[in-house]
Amino acid sequence: MRNLWLRYAWLRYGLCLWVVLGLLPVAATAYGPDEPKKAPAVEGEYDMEITVTGAGIFPVELKVMRDEQGKLICESKDQIGVSITGITVDDDGQVTLTGNYQGMEFEFKGKLEGDTMKGEFDISGYAGTWVATRRKPSKE
């Protein structure tokens, strides 16, 4: 009688172990790592305003695109000689625009939210804010 009980206990134990091991891949999938975040899409044409404290507002036309290698690049047109040539965007929408003004390198750091990028800057005594709003595609 004792052997029958032991055999039944081992059978029960084996069945439970089989069920648990069978469910582990399901649990691992359900609680596995999240999908990696993808950086928000930033390509497009923007109307940008650079507001320099004490000096005024300077409009800039900004175009963000990808080069042949898929790297984000910028082109800018303005009246004061600001050249914005680079941009990085992380998974959380943190933006860094890079460029130069009269030979001085600068970075504009900010945040991308929907169709707007904005931030603040303080570069060699020039401080202020910047905002760039994506142009809506024209309906032709």
Image (spheres, helix red, strand yellow):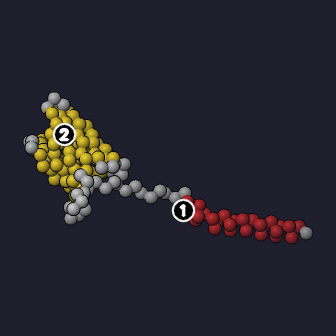
**Residue 80, quarter of picture:** top left
Which residue lies at the image location 12% right of the left edge and 49% below the top edge?
A: 77
The secondary structure type at the circle numbered 2 is strand
**Cα–Cα span, label 2 and label 1:** 48 Å
Residue 140 x %, y %: 21, 62
Residue 122 x %, y %: 21, 35
Of badges 2 and 1, nearer the viewer stands: 2
Q: Amino acid at mark 2?
A: Ile
Question: How many labels were placed on the picture?
Answer: 2
Q: Amino acid at mark 1?
A: Thr
Q: Is residue 120 visible?
A: yes
Residue 132 placement, left or right of 13: left
| Label placed on residue 29 | 1
Above or below, 15 against 96 in this view is below
- Residue at image mark 2: 50
Quarter of the N terminus within the rendering: bottom right
**Residue 100, quarter of picture:** top left
Which residue lies at the image location 52% right of the left edge and 58% below the top edge?
A: 32
In depth, the one of 14 and 57 nearer the eye is 57
Q: Is residue 122 visible?
A: no
